[in-house]
């Protein structure tokens, strides 16, 4: 087993070294990113995807260069797959966070695995909730007081429906359409205003809210079932056929997994073990 691991480490080092050498021709680590999407990315470059991009670029002796575009429908088409004017030069080369197996890009190995959580504002009468399932068995009078954010898409709304709590849901759109607030920022404001008391939210976005007021919230992980999945792996996206860059990123992920975890943990992102890798799709 040790010999196998050593061989894998050596192979990753060789790939990283070879690709790093050839990458000096570009001298840029070119990232497609949303300019206002905490905790992932921002023009201030204070998101965790920004920090991981900086880590990789430093090891490649490159400079990070961003092409900014709002994360919405058409993001990949207008960034990773878009060229500059009439040239053959693409606007950017890597998306730092996409779901593993994402259809619109080739994807690297997963670099973290997280889950949706039930995020509860403390001090509003719900502090005794220790698992999400408790909401189902509350006395009817107390259930009727619940104010839970629910989205037009996502497993949280499905869970509320299965739990008989849909009437307690306060509806929000997955994409805010607000140039000054992404979903996490919007939900933070709604929680602070008292318009909602809790929300079932993707772990990294819930982590952003907690990071703003660490003592004001509690996060309870949602557990996947056969009928409803809450946990997902995240990878990086490149253009189909860009196999050299994909190999480069995989080598960087393998080499830096511990440091990546440290960055994510510093942002309070709830992490689960990364499942074993499935067979790659054909990237040709």
Image (cartoon, helix red, strand yellow):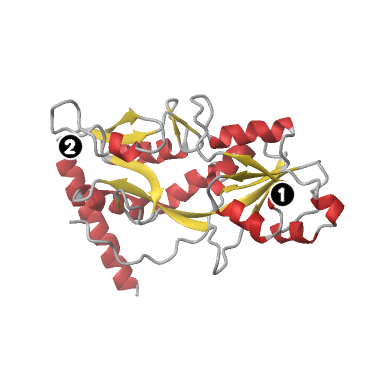
Q: Position of residue 195 (x, y in %)?
A: 72, 34
In this view, the residue in front, 257 or 153, is 153
Q: Is residue 76 above or below residue 202?
A: above
> Which tag, 2 or 1, sits closer to the chain's start?
2
Quadrant, the N terminus: bottom left
Residue 246 is left or right of residue 255, and the answer is left
Q: Quadrant of the C terminus?
A: bottom left
In this view of the protein, which residue sits in the foreground, 2 or 96? 96
Residue 38 in picture, x, y percent from top left: 50, 34
Residue in the foreground of this view, choosing between 109 and 84? 84
Secondary structure under the numbered disc 1 in the rendered image: helix
* Left or right of 130, for residue 71: left
Q: Residue at x 47, y 56 (%)?
A: 232
Q: Residue furthest front?
A: 167
Tell me if I can see residue 262 in this picture.
Answer: yes
Residue at the image position 85 percent from the left and 57 percent from the top: 139
Which mark is in front, 2 or 1? 1
Q: Is residue 32 left or right of residue 90?
A: right
Any mark on residue 167, and which?
A: 1
Q: Which residue is mark 2?
A: 24
């Amino acid at each position: 087993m040790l010999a196998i691991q050593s061989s894998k480490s050596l192979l990753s080092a060789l790939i990283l070294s070879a690709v790093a050498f050839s990458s000096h021709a570009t001298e840029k680590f070119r990232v497609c990113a949303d300019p206002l999407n905490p905790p992932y990315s921002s023009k201030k470059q204070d998101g965790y995807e920004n920090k991981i991009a900086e880590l990789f670029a430093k090891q490649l002796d490159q400079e990070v260069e961003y092409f900014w575009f709002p994360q919405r429908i058409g993001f990949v088409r207008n960034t990773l797959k878009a060229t500059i004017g009439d040239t053959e030069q693409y606007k950017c080369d890597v998306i730092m966070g996409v779901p593993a197996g994402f259809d619109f890009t080739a994807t690297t190995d997963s670099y973290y695995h997280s889950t949706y959580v039930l995020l509860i504002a403390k001090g509003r009468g719900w502090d005794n909730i220790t698992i999400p399932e408790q909401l189902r068995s509350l006395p009817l009078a107390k259930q009727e007081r619940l104010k839970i954010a629910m989205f037009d898409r996502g497993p949280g709304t499905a869970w509320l429906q299965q739990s008989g709590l849909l009437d307690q849901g306060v509806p929000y759109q997955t994409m805010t359409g607000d140039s000054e607030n992404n979903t996490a920022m919007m939900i933070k404001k709604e929680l602070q205003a008292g318009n909602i008391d809790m929300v079932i939210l993707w772990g990294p976005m819930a982590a952003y809210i907690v990071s703003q007021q660490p003592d004001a919230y509690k996060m309870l992980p949602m557990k996947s079932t056969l009928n409803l999945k809450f946990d997902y792996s995240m990878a990086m996206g490149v253009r189909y056929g860009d196999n050299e860059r994909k190999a480069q990123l995989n080598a960087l992920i393998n080499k830096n997994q511990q440091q990546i975890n440290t960055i994510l943990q510093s942002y309070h992102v709830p992490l689960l073990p990364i499942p074993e890798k499935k067979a790659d799709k054909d990237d040709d």
